[in-house]
Image: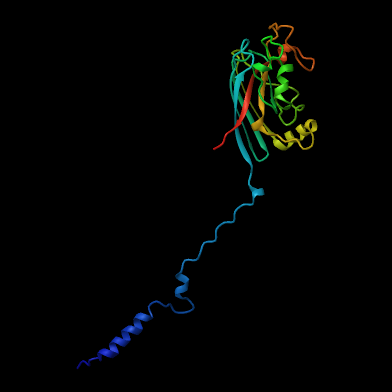
Amino acid sequence: MIERVPALLLASAMLVSVSGCGKKSGSGSSEAAKVQPVTPLPELPVEDVIPSAFFNVEFADLNPQKYTIKGTGQMSYLGDDFTVSLEMAKVPRSRSITQRVFNGRCPDAASDANGDGYIDLAEAIETLGHPIIDLDRNINTRTSGRGVFPVSDALGMYSYSQKGLLTRIREDVRKVLGPDAEISLGDSVVLIQGLPRSYTLPKTVASMDGKPAIETLPLACGRIREIIE
């Protein structure tokens, strides 16, 4: 004969069973199932952020009656690493092309002080400022590259690329401009110089440092502009 369980006793047993389902035996608890808060990564101090910048060089002719030069350039630095590259065309053919960074601005038609139709180096230097980097085979100092500049091909073209260290370049600049001098590429320009020796220039065209005017005559000047993203 089957005995009937009182309804009240059965309901009590079911209540106990349900209330115990959320708990685990032993030391575990429902707290372990909760999502723990994520601790965000600390922000890097300002001094730990690697400085970087990118620049374009935009060229314009200075003495177009002799050459209409085409060219583009890029400069960049990441930390202490400095890189410069130039792609030039329609320059004098098969000759060494002098290229330097100056800390001033490009001259214009008003720089032709004697009105002879040429902007020579002696006139241009008033706005160009001081040469700070020789873009030759070693850009770390103005003497380490020994003035070995790129040579154009038979079509009047050349490509140039070099790497250096900003600390070395800054040290070299400070030897001439003083211990507090800084390099501000965005306020600087690139000057391209030099005609073939077969050219004859008027005697009114001046030069500097005892060099012939055909070697120092400015052909193009490129403004260095920072790329702002």
**Where in the figure is residue 208, as x and y percent of width and height?**
77, 17
Residue farthest to the left? 1
**Where in the figure is residue 109, as x and y percent of width and height?**
64, 16
Front position in the image: 33 or 65: 65
Front position in the image: 196 or 61: 61
Q: Residue at x 32, y 86 (%)?
A: 13
Front position in the image: 96 or 187: 187
**Residue 74, image quadrant:** top right
Residue 141 visible in this rendered orientation of the protein:
yes
**Where in the figure is residue 166, as x and y percent of width and height?**
70, 36
Q: Residue at x 61, y 14 (%)?
A: 156
**Residue 98, image quadrant:** top right
When the figure is inspected, residue 164 is found, relative to residue 7, above or below; the finding is: above
Q: Residue at x 32, y 87 (%)?
A: 12
When the figure is inspected, residue 96 is found, relative to residue 15, above or below; the finding is: above
Q: Residue at x 66, y 37 (%)?
A: 81
**Where in the figure is residue 224, as x and y percent of width and height?**
62, 29
Residue 96 visible in this rendered orientation of the protein:
no
**Residue 228, image quadrant:** top right
Query: Across the whole image, how many numbered discs are drawn on residues?
Result: 0
Q: Quadrant of the N terminus?
A: bottom left
When the figure is inspected, residue 2 is found, relative to residue 77, above or below; the finding is: below
> From the viewer's perspective, is 78 left or right of 34?
right
The image's colouring method is rainbow
Q: Quadrant of the C terminus?
A: top right
